[in-house]
Amino acid sequence: MMEADHEDGSYDRNKELKLFDETKAGVKGLVDAGLTKLPKIFVHDNHKVNDSSSSSSSSATNVSIPVIDLGSLHEEGNSRHEIVQKVKDAGEKWGFFQVVNHKIPQSILDEMLDGVRKFHEQDAEVKKEFYSRDITKRVFYNTNFNFYTTSEVNWRDTLYCLLAPGPLDPHQLPSICRDVIIEYLDHIKKLALTLLELLSEALGLEGNYLKDIDCGEGIFMVGNYYPPCPEPELTWGLSAHTDMGFVTILLQDQVGGLQVFHENQWFDITPFPGAFIINLGDMMQLITNDKFMSAKHRVVAQKVGPRVSVSCSLRQHVQDECLRMYGPIKELVTKENPPIYKEMKMPDLVKLVYTTKLDYDISSPLKHFRL
Ligand code: OGA
Ligand code: NI
């Protein structure tokens, strides 16, 4: 494997990508083989050593993303109003917050993380059957969805499950984590509706507004597995990016490594037991006409691992399943605050991100939808 280096020292990157892809064993396969040096395809041109903005400052300044307690949501008094106010602040300033007391039992969170870990650690031959780059499939796994289009291959394998809308045949889900995914989905759907209500109210709209325009219709689940990396300073677990959907509900284990870009600095999102990280995506920024922001985030590669995370994005990406057009919400635009974006269909954004080489340090995919 990995013999695409020519005798004259030149290197056939495409060939090396293909050789790796064809193993269908992922980054996990490299680690299992006892690799101690990173293959060239994983070595980033502008790796961390040269990245002056990379050192996180949260430990120095003790700033962390807002933590919102949902426990008192249905109590009498002002608590709902206060929660909505916090969601508004977080949406405008960070695009990120954490929620606690969300009522989803800790055992389900633990089992979900464990299920994803088991998927990636199961027998390599069984796992291979799921390896694919056919994004029309509802369930598959691979190393980096943008493997062939990006110049930055990341130290991460991912299981993808399109859970909604449309018919979910449970038998398509990997048997090793099938039951827990179905149970988790049930809880996530409820949390998603609560979040859409709070976000609607935070925008000054009717509580049902975002639900009624189908923001909660699509649920795309991603189970990330970041194996321990022998040379973490040369690569990323997940390069800086924004999420595409309306809202992402992210569950991370206790290893850490996730960072968010805020006011020109990177901040660690330190694991908080039992919490979900909620971040707003590009579609939310578009429909709110930039009132809410889709914040850039990334995951550093680390010697320790594996790290596991599960993200559920409210996003619809199957071309014929979502014909609805989205643009800035009429109630949110005025003469003084005219629409910034044109009407578009969500799969157009997904297609753009999947097929274009994007550099989030320079711009956002949303610029393609500006008026
Ligand atoms: C993502 C993501 C972060 C993480 O899947 O889009 O940002 O902690 N994941 O794995
Ligand atoms: Ni993300």
Image: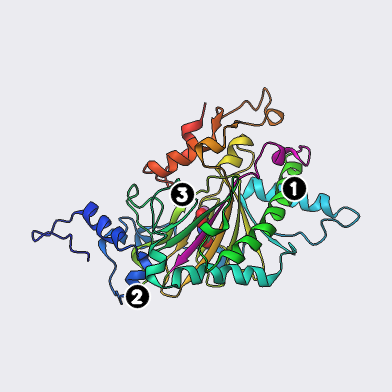
Q: Which residue is mark 1?
A: 198
Marks 1 and 2, how far apart in space?
A: 45 Å
Numbered badge on residue 7 = none
- Vertical relation: 62 (above or below) 289: below
Label 2 and label 3: CA atoms lie apart by 27 Å
Crowd tier of the residue under label 2, counting other residues whose Cα lies within 10 Å: few below 14, some 14–19, many 20 or above: few
- In this orientation, which residue lies closer to the viewer: 80 or 347? 347
Q: Which residue is at the far bottom?
A: 34
Q: Secondary structure at mark 3?
A: loop
Q: Nearer the viewer, mark 1 or mark 2?
A: 2
Q: Amino acid at mark 3?
A: Lys
Closer to the camera, 19 or 202? 19
**Residue 26 drawn above or below residue 199:** below
Give the residue type that dot 2 points to. Answer: Asp
Read off the residue under disc 3.
Answer: 137
The range drawn in magenta is 204-226
Q: Are marks 1 and 2 in contact (CB under 8 Å)?
A: no
Q: Residue at x 16, y 60 (%)?
A: 5
Q: Is residue 118 left or right of residue 214?
A: left
Looking at the picture, how far across and down is residue 169, in whole percent?
A: 56, 54
Query: Residue 32 bears which disc, if any?
Result: 2
Q: Is residue 211 magenta?
A: yes
The colour style of the image is rainbow
Q: State which tag comes first along the sequence, 1 or 3.
A: 3
Q: Quadrant of the image for the N terminus?
A: bottom left
Q: Label 2's element?
A: helix
The reply to whether residue 363 is visible in this rendering is no
Q: Answer above or below: position of 37 versus 287.
A: below
Rounded to the nearest angstrom, the CA distance separating label 1 from label 3 is: 32 Å
Mark 2, ligand 1, within 8 Å: the answer is: no
Horizontal side, residue 9 vs residue 184: left or right: left
Q: Amino acid at mark 1?
A: Leu
